[in-house]
């Protein structure tokens, strides 16, 4: 037994190789109870492979998965019983109605019949419950997938790219469902995405994976703090101005003909301006430049590709 | 049967709603019945000269078609049942559930085998009805007809395991189809050679209860049942340890 009962997901040195290619490399995920954990990374970074290992769909080459503090490899049935999942594209039998689709799981797991109506209500598909799913929009299919994940009243839900390919309205609905899970049902959520903006709007914790390695894992606030604004100062003689400010203890750098001051400098804009003017500099521009989460993410992943 | 196996069967039943599978199992024996009606009607004098064992002729004519229909049926039903999951992209959803994977394979196997059994039972009825229509005494024929229903069915069980395993583990159903069709067409002629008993695809053709059968049909049926169960276990265990796409 693990001592930390608050840890819903914990992976230890989780690794998966395909031949010589390492797809997931020594990943140590930690997801605590009640969190919405955003699992972020560009396409092909190893998100889906990691999630498949969390669900026991594929085996790790090395390392282990602990769910609710218990090893997945030894207690598969017990721990999977408390998890609902939606992996990538939605699974659905097109010739069956939404209700019948959920019935296949309800019967297999021997759940109560009325759970079907409850979860259909949760994802607002009650009206379309008795229509063949092949006529559903992608957003409805995805919501049906979420209903399937909620069917057995799980303690934790793992959603892989749940908003992929949805239109803005669909994305909004899925986001709302995710936000409601911890609030209304006490469900811990792990949600993956290649879109930072998606994660930014729902997550409390963030893990960033790139090239199979987990390169960041902390609360979303820590990630946001990284985005503290820098100060950009334009003067006629940047070299002399830099000397002056450095003399005052400011870490000033010259980039593209302008002075850049790090983090905390923004709070003393007035003082910095006065120093420069009193020393005879002509200050033509002072501005705060905010780094977006996108910039930080790109810095971390070292990728210039669009996300 | 345990509760989990029954719930697996019930879950599979829901998936078969509005599909052709059950109809296929019903229509195949009806088709064989119809073809033999023409066959008997057209060449009655040739097939049944005075003094022949009429029921032996009936079951051998049915067997000519059913020995092909059973392997084809196993191939087709397995491909359709597995194809439902491939089409639905449902393996990843189903196999992440707290259910034993071998049981999931077992439920599907029971459905394929069960539908083939339904076909076989209907085939027995078809033989008796057609014989009766041509004036043969049912009380003389039901025993041999029942054996013709049951023995080739048991001999087909290894194919149920193998075809279901192929169809479940491969996304593209062309390979399982090719294996099933080639096996059903080319294995029976090899039944007479030494290697015949090593090719399960030849078993259905070897299991008809007639004095004209060079093989022992009962022995072939037992062999089919034994190999069928062993291959079921092996295939289910392999299915359970595979990575899920």
Image (tube, rainbow, N blue to C red):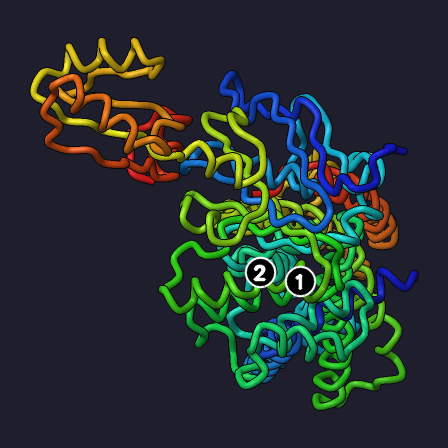
| Residue where numbered disc 1 is placed | A183
Q: Quadrant of residue B170?
A: top right
What residue is rendered at 58% in x and 72% in y? A123
Foreground residue, B61 or B239?
B239
The circle on residue B244 is none
What residue is rendered at 72% in x and 34% in y? A10
Q: Quadrant of residue B10?
A: bottom right
Give residue A83's position: percent from left, percent from top: 72, 52
Q: In which quarter of the image is residue B24?
A: bottom right
A99 versus B1 height, above or below: below
Foreground residue, B148 or A242?
A242
| Residue where numbered disc 2 is placed | A179
From this viewpoint, is residue B82 visible? yes
Foreground residue, A250 or B219?
A250
Are dots 2 and 1 in contact, CB under 8 Å? yes
B27 versus B215 height, above or below: below
What residue is rendered at 48% in x and 35% in y? A223
């Amino acid at each position: 037994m693990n001592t930390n009962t608050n840890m819903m997901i914990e992976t230890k040195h989780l690794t998966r190789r395909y031949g010589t290619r390492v797809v997931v490399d020594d990943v140590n995920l930690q997801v605590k109870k009640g969190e919405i954990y955003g699992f972020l990374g560009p396409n092909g970074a190893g998100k889906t492979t990691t999630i498949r290992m969390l669900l026991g769909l594929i085996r790790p080459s090395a390392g282990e998965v602990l769910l609710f503090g218990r090893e997945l490899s030894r207690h598969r049935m017990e721990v999977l019983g408390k998890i609902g999942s939606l992996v990538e594209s939605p699974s659905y039998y097109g010739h069956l109605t939404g209700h019948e689709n959920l019935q296949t799981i309800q019967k297999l797991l021997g759940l109560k019949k009325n759970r079907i109506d409850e979860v259909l209500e949760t994802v607002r598909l009650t009206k379309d419950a008795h229509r063949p799913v092949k006529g559903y929009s992608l957003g409805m299919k995805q919501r049906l997938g979420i209903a399937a994940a909620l069917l057995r009243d799980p303690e934790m839900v793992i959603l892989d790219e749940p908003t992929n390919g949805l239109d803005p309205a669909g994305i909004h609905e899925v986001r709302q469902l995710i936000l409601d899970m911890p609030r209304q049902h006490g469900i811990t959520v792990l949600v993956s995405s290649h879109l930072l903006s998606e994660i930014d709007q729902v997550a409390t914790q963030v893990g960033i994976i790139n090239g199979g390695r987990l390169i960041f894992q902390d609360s979303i606030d820590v990630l946001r703090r990284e985005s503290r604004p820098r100060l950009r100062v334009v003067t006629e003689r940047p070299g002399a101005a830099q000397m002056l400010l450095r003399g005052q203890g400011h870490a000033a750098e010259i980039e593209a003909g302008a002075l850049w001051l790090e983090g905390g400098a923004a709070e003393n804009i007035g003082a910095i301006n006065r120093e420069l003017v009193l020393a005879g500099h002509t200050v033509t521009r002072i501005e705060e430049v905010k780094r977006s989460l996108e910039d930080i993410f790109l810095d971390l992943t070292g990728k210039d590709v669009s996300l | 049967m345990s509760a989990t196996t029954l719930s697996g069967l019930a879950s599979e039943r829901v998936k078969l709603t509005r599909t052709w599978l059950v109809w296929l199992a019903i229509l195949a024996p009806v088709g064989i019945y119809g073809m033999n009606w023409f066959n008997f009607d057209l060449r009655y004098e040739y097939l049944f000269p005075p003094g022949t064992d009429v029921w032996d002729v009936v079951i051998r004519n049915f067997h000519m078609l059913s020995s092909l229909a059973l392997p084809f049926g196993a191939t087709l039903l397995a491909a359709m049942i597995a194809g439902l999951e491939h089409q639905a992209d449902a393996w990843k959803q189903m196999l992440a559930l707290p259910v034993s994977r071998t049981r999931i394979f077992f439920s599907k196997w029971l459905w394929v085998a069960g539908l083939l059994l339904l076909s076989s039972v209907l085939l027995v009825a078809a033989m008796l009805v057609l014989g009766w229509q041509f004036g043969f005494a049912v009380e003389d024929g039901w025993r041999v007809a029942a054996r013709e229903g049951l023995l080739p069915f048991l001999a087909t069980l290894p194919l149920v395991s193998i075809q279901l395993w192929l169809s479940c583990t491969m996304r593209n159903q062309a390979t399982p189809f090719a294996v099933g069709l080639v096996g059903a067409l080319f294995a029976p002629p090899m039944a007479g050679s030494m290697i015949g008993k090593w090719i399960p695809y030849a078993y259905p053709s070897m299991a008809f209860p007639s004095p004209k059968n060079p093989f022992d049909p009962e022995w072939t049926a037992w062999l089919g049942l034994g190999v069928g169960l062993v291959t079921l276990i092996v295939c289910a265990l392999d299915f359970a340890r595979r990575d899920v796409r």
